[in-house]
Amino acid sequence: MSELTIPHVHHRHVDVDGLRIFYRETGPAEAPVLLLLHGFPSASHQYARLLDALGTRYRLIAPDYPGFGHSDSPAPDAFTYRFDTLADVVEGFCLALRLDRFALYVFDFGAPVGLRLATRRPEWITGLVVQNGNAYEEGLSYQAVEFIANRRGVPGAAQAARAILTPEITRGQYEGGTGDPSLVAPDGWTLDQHALDLPGRKDIQVELALDYFSNLELYPAWQAWLRAAQPPTLIVWGRNDPFFTEAGARAYLRDLPEAELHVFDTGHFALEEKLPEIAPLIDDFLARTQK
């Protein structure tokens, strides 16, 4: 009888500057580490199947940002929700878990959080897996540019940001652009919407939406780091993403000519439909680049 190996996945909390931060962890303690940073409006649960797929070979760690998932979610008058402060918390999370050498998986919000971390702590980063995580202006769709124009002081900006926090739009982020929606479990978007509907959570998301423009201002610095550091990089991208276009995936090659690029005929949450195709690519990439 063949041996079937399935990893145990631990669900834990750690204190980071007074915030109780939830995270999922699997894999051998001595194995190469992959830190997985989630997107909007999701949380670490979006990586549950990937943890199962790779957790016997690598140490995978996926935290929830404050205001997301099972982490503490103080009101905006008690915690300043900005991309800078999310990066502060992830940096503190790494220090708390003594993570100082890892590959970084960046998706959606995880790109601006993770690239902030990379430019602050470049010695920590041994490689990148980029999945629909934008760092180039040409990767922004018209819809994304229009949304990013919402910022503090712009009349109607907060209302426009709040308008996307609906079940229809949350579901659309998962199913939109997929070739076979039956491969997308409803659990992801319903769990995300449940979290969004908790008291105070929509106020948090509005705060972050109105700060998204700050990421564009840092694109040149992130691109300069990529050019200088040349981290081993795997890019996997859903080409039907309504926010972050295929041009944004290909733009990385300008600064990382040795990066490996794979584009899939799916949407924003590419792992939902294409995990059987993407997980082996990540496995192969980590096996070749992480020692």
Image (cartoon, helix red, strand yellow):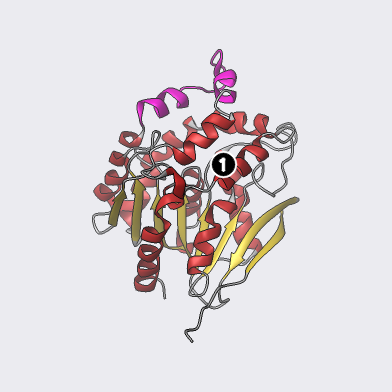
Q: Is residue 3 left or right of residue 255?
A: right
Residue closest to the eye, 150 or 241: 241
As drawn, 189 above or below 209: below
Decide if residue 100 is in sight here: no
Residue topped by disc 1:
189
As drawn, 100 above or below 181: below
Looking at the picture, how far across and down is residue 180, in whole percent?
39, 45
Q: Residue at x 61, y 41 (%)?
A: 190
Outermost residue toward the bottom in this view: 1
Disc 1 element: helix
Looking at the picture, how far across and down is residue 188, in whole percent?
56, 46
Among the 4 quarters of the image, the one containing residue 95: bottom right
Outermost residue toward the top in this view: 155
Q: Residue at x 48, y 75 (%)?
A: 57
Q: Residue at x 44, y 43 (%)?
A: 181
Instruction: Find the magenta span and give its range.
Output: 141-162
Q: Is residue 229 left or right of residue 212?
A: left
